[in-house]
Amino acid sequence: MATTDDDRRPKYQRIADSLREAIQSGEYGPGDRLPGENDLMSTHGVARMTARQALSVLRDEGVAEARKGAGVFVRDFRPIRRRSIERLARDQWGNGRSIWSVDIENRALEVDRITVSEETAPDRINAVLNLPADGTTCVRRRRFVLDGKPVLLSTSYLPMHLVAASPIAQEDTGPGGTYARLAELGHEPVHFREEIRSRMPSKDEAAQLSMSPGTPVILICRTAFTDEGGPVEVNEMTLDAASYVLEYDFDAGPRTTPTDLSSLG
């Protein structure tokens, strides 16, 4: 009998595949306990290390989670659907609603860490905001916690000469948040650009987001521009990839961009 590619794969991967298929078929539902190491050893005739590796694959994928002293369970995945276009619409923040309310529906959101400071921003931020090397920015750092789980770290940079002495320089920016306050100051954002990439988290990021080993982070850098094309905010966000689905819903219409954005590169 010919040997298939699947036959040549390590046993732990084949066991992980069978468990994943059982989860996808509904044999094991959210919150259900998966077979333990002893069960897998007996069923598949493998060593403990092989059984442990199979379960580790599912944990690293975010499919399962270990509970100390209880075993490994199917993760109850309730993704945050980040609706990037809808959340940034003026009808949202312009009417006093948080842009977060688009994502979380009726779930419990908390900003449990927030600091606001005046700093000289890194060169990469100064370059985007068209600030001199010694220019100062208002820096807003926040950690967002949803249903008791940290899911996002956010650092916003805004030119200090635009926002000094405004609520933006305070912890509580008020209804509608930063963008509503920028509009009141005469710097309404009308165009946004987001750049997205992914990597493994730093040790500090993994600790702050209480992430499972092997889970990557999503990095989103958003720049907000006024109608004249002037940049007024750079927001660098670090998202727990196991908690998010990024959703984009848009028409295939003509491209509209502020006239001088192309000069920003």
Image: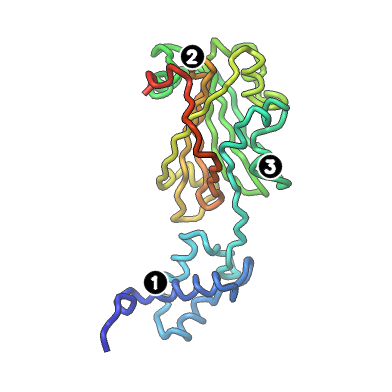
Identify the disc placed on residue 119.
none
Residue located at (68% from left, 31% from top)? 92
Of all residues, the one furthest to the front in this rendering is 253
Q: Nearer the viewer, residue 163 or 185?
A: 185
Residue 23 in the image: x percent, y percent? 55, 71
- N-terminal of the pair, mark 2 or mark 1, is 1
Q: Are marks 3 and 1 in contact (CB under 8 Å)?
A: no
The amino acid beneath tag 2 is Thr
Residue located at (48% from left, 20% from top)? 258
Q: Secondary structure at mark 2?
A: strand
Residue assigned mark 3: 109
Residue assigned mark 2: 136
**Between tags 2 and 1, which lies in front?**
1
- Mark 2 to mark 1: distance in Å? 52 Å
- N-terminal of the pair, mark 2 or mark 3, is 3
Q: Nearer the viewer, residue 146 or 46?
A: 146
The amino acid beneath tag 1 is Gln
